[in-house]
Amino acid sequence: MARLDETALKKRAALCAYCGSCTAGCPVQSVAPDFGPRAIARRALFGLSAEATEASWLCAGCHKCDMACPQDVRPSSIIRHLRGLSPETGRLHPAFSKQMELLMKQGRLYLVDEFENESREDEGLPRLAEELPDVAVLLGGGEQA
Amino acid sequence: MKEYALFLGCTVPVRAQAYEKSVRAVASRLGIVLTDIPELSCCGYPISSVWEQKGLALAARNLALSETAGFGQMVCLCSACSLHLKESAERLNHDSQLLEETNQQLARVGLAYRGTVSVFHIVDVLLSLDFHVKRDLSHLHVACHHGCHYFNPSRFIRIMELPLHRLVERTGARLVEYPMELECCGGGSMAVDERIPAALARAKLQDVYEHAADLLTVICPFCYIVYGASQKKLGLPFSVPVYFYPQLLGLAMGIDASELGLSPAQAKTLLSQGGMLA
């Protein structure tokens, strides 16, 4: 597993020809004009990781930027790279630490308990396992990124 | 007969039971056997953009459970699950070093993955089947929303046409095309800022409404939450009913509305015209 580092990040960002196709096609940018994959890639290249990481959290993960990019930069991979560095640099967004917490606790984002299983049974749907303790074991290891 | 392990993920079994019910109802009549594995967990997608290896390990856990239960094919209802599991299976099934590293993690929970599972979205499965339409839905004008993760990134998913167009036409309903059809629901940003999906949904639903669609059909629980379950909060001066495609298909096949997760009122609206075909 290639370790995430800033050099690899800059190498990918350096492929950018600044054309802006990614940002023009970005759905989030159309409703949040301060956001844009091109600006994130440029900030990453200039070593402005804090600003770039902060911006990265609004990304919806739709991959439209990847499909628009004529240079095959794959802007979404820059965003993932920045997010991947964030637990070590103390920049992790609370929404993501919350999701990790939920998965460690219950194995799924939405709780399936006795109440939920009863409501599923009322709908004629089969019960699901309520406890998935192995997920916390799997996710809790020392493996980085 | 086609047999699959059914992958429900986090959202479908709790917040989109109508989708799950309609898929089961339709599948049972099309000779598709869906087997439940109660221990399946989150697919790993939600955490994978931060913790790539942990996201992959969680996907591998689900693939290994399916493989161990004897299923070489797994079918997903959620497009994000299907993207993440397709992508993870493609990587693990073709990269022996990555498979070995991931198996070292899986060994901690007593699992091993051999790299034999193929992953499908329910739409992939429906596209490959013939079905008989018994009820006339030609009065319904249907707009489609595929959602990004059914298509993107295209290096994993290769599609030359919009599959819901063909599937809607096969139900006998009328297809409504509209300019914003391929726009994203923004669901992926919801946990960070709810205003993003809300703004995207307002614009898209307006477009659907202006093109005189009777309803919008979706194939992903997240898209449903954005356009359907959250629609009242958007403050729009009109409403656009949102249904999962298998609910429409089930109606066309003559299945009772209650089996498709449709309320009597919804069924009445959808079937106010038309009738059984000769």
Image (cartoon, coloured by chain):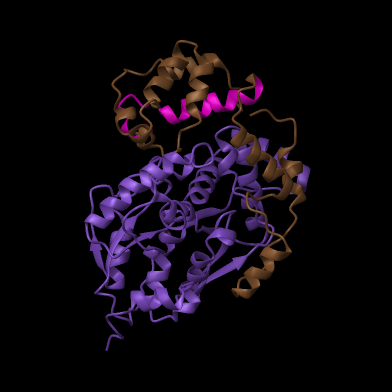
Identify whether B4 is placed above or below B182.
below
Q: Quadrant of residue A73?
A: top left
Label count reads: 0
Q: Residue furthest top?
A: A46
Q: Is residue A132 left or right of residue B45?
A: right
Q: Is residue A112 left or right of residue B190?
A: right
Residue A136 in view, yes or no: yes
* x and y percentages locating residue B24 in the rendered image: 52, 71
* x and y percentages locating residue B238 in the rendered image: 31, 58
Which color has been applied to chain A in this rendered view? brown
* x and y percentages locating residue A30 in the rendered image: 33, 34
Q: Nearer the viewer, residue B40 or B67?
A: B40
Residue in the picture at 41% in, 60% down:
B123
Identify whether A135 is placed above or below B22.
above
Is residue A80 rendered magenta in the image? yes
Residue in the picture at 68% in, 66% down:
A117
Identify whether B186 is placed above or below B178.
above
Q: Residue furthest bottom?
A: B278
Residue in the picture at 22% in, 55% down:
B210
Q: Main secondary structure of the magenta part?
A: helix
* x and y percentages locating residue A42 in the rendered image: 40, 16
Q: Nearer the viewer, residue B197 or B161?
A: B197
**Which quarter of the image is occupied by the C terminus of chain B?**
bottom left
Residue B7 in view, yes or no: no
Q: Any idea which chain is the purple one in this picture?
A: B
Residue in the picture at 38% in, 32% down:
A32
Is residue B73 rendered magenta in the image? no
The residue segment tinted magenta is: A66-88
